[in-house]
Image (spheres, grey):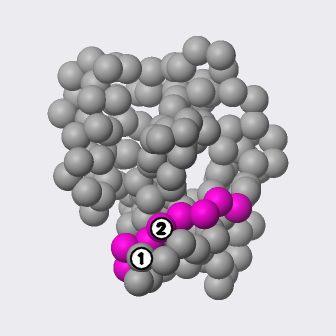
Amino acid sequence: MSLYFAYGSCMNQEDLARSRVQATYVGTAVLRNYRLAFSRYSTYRGGGVADIVREPGEFVEGVLYEVGDFHALDRREGAPFVYRRRKVRVYPESLGGRWRWAWTYEVVEKSPVEIAPSREYALLIWEGARALSLEYRRKLKENLLGRMGEFL
């Protein structure tokens, strides 16, 4: 089993399950020196979709899963053409707080300008973020509101 760090709609376990991804929830984790961005338009989602962008001093919180087979997840994410799977170093709260390697996905061809997510997609992310820290959820809410107006 490998660790998978989800920071967008895959934090929402119901949305993740629709793709028939076999994933076991482990806990939450932090990816340092990255920020959350919406750098690609998705016809399926009707707006911008989540991405990670390197940004010193910033951080992204997310949900950590154990995944045995990444085939269904790769299909869901359009890997390797839409998103690419890559290893990142995360700091999980549930595994003793020591950094661990985990797989995550990042957009392959990033738009030079960010694209507002649809209301439905933003709500999937928001609902999936329930386990994250209050500080990060405030930051996430500001990020989502700033991109698409009031939705909560």
Residue where numbered disc 2 is placed: 91
**Does label 2 or label 1 sit earlier along the sequence?**
2
62 over 49 or under it: above or below: below
Query: Which secondary structure lies at badge 2?
Result: strand
Q: Amino acid at mark 1?
A: Gly
The 10 Å Cα crowd at callout 1, few under 14, some 14 to 19, many 20 or more, is: few
**Magenta stretch, residue numbers:** 87-94
Q: Position of residue 76 (x, y in %)?
A: 65, 53
Q: Residue at x 52, y 20 (%)?
A: 115
Q: Position of residue 77 (x, y in %)?
A: 66, 49
Asked whether 70 falls inside the magenta stretch, the response is no
Residue where numbered disc 1 is placed: 97
In the image as oriented, which residue stretches furthest toward the right?
A: 80
27 over 88 or under it: above or below: below
Q: Position of residue 83 (x, y in %)?
A: 71, 44
2 and 1 marks in contact (CB < 8 Å): yes
